[in-house]
Amino acid sequence: MVTLPTKAHIGKRLTIALRDSHGNTRELLGILLDPKTIRTRDGASESFDPDAITNWRVVSEVATKAGRGAPLSMRVREIESVLTNTWPRVHSAQDGNWNLRFTEHDSDFANSVLPTGARPFGEPDSELDQAIADAVTFYTLHNQIPAIAIPPAIYPQLDNYLDSQGWRIAGETDIMVADTNDFPNSPQHTSVSQLKGIRCETLEVPTSSWCDFQGATPLIEVINRYPAYYLSVFIDEQQVAAARIAMNNGWGVITRVKVQSDHRLQGIGRSLIQKVAEVSSGHNSYKLALQVDGSNSNALTFFRSVGFRSHHRNRYRVPAITN
């Protein structure tokens, strides 16, 4: 008699061989969601009869570089998950595998529907037209602009359908990744402590001065909804740079990177990112992720120069009637 996978195996990658009552065989490979369901490589959830299992095994996880190693759809979902987890919205609702979320005073990009299910449309509970209408109603009732976040590489049909219905592109973000182990080996990265006259402070709570420098005081509620580290760089006790790093599932997610305009191009931004990488790796999170406004060419150039690479792009569509 085969010993079956249990709840202890949920979240692990398994290969499962099955034989039905007619002698037909098949094999499933994916993440076990519960003792009767597995998420396959394309992101779909597939049920199976545990009594039909002939053998199974846990597939050993192989350490991979950030954003590499798995099918693109799984990589995108993994990264989008850690981005969402580390910047949780104050308000959210679920429509099947569509996550409707928003926070007052946050950017339009953060306040959007995030599809997370299988292709082609992300698996909302209802038919696509109804799901879209329900999303519009949700955001309108909360005085928010309806928006849907789409990685076109994963959901091209959803992107094309919204385009055909008059939903315009309001903006795009580049999701960028890097590995913390790459930073210490690069001579271009200098530790903050090695820069003369500069002090770096790392705290577990955002101080009022950190929020004031960031202009993030209205977002304090969402900032405090997930544990993070808050870095500040001072020159002669004047704050000149800041960042936030939060760890989730082996990833360090970087947000709110800011260097005062008159202190840019002096190596401070590079050294700040180096310090952020040190904090992340010190908590066994060796992969880094961040998102950049796709129209911010200076920021994109900076992050590429310090070792980040583009992983995928998110497109944000809103109804044509919005401003």
Image: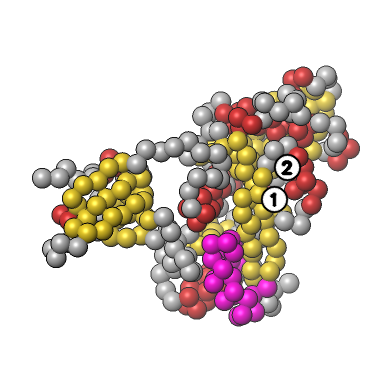
Q: Give the residue at mark 1.
A: 292
Q: Position of residue 21 (x, y in %)?
A: 13, 63
Q: Are marks 2 and 1 in contact (CB under 8 Å)?
A: yes
Q: What residue sits 50% from the left and 62% below the top?
A: 115
Q: Could you say which quadrant of the image residue 107 lies in?
A: bottom right
Magenta highlight on residue 229: no
Q: Nearer the viewer, residue 266 or 313?
A: 313
Q: Give the residue at mark 2.
A: 303
State which tag comes first along the sequence, 2 or 1: 1
Residue segment shown in magenta: 147-168
The amino acid pointed to by label 1 is Val
Quadrant for the C terminus, please.
bottom right
Magenta highlight on residue 156: yes
Q: Secondary structure at mark 1?
A: strand
Q: Is residue 100 left or right of residue 21?
A: right
| Vertical order, 131 against 310 (above or below) | below
Q: Position of residue 85 (x, y in %)?
A: 51, 47
The amino acid pointed to by label 2 is Phe
Q: What residue sits 54% from the left and 66% below the top?
A: 155
Q: What residue sits 78% from the left and 46% below the top?
A: 301
Q: Could you say which quadrant of the image residue 203 lies in?
A: top right
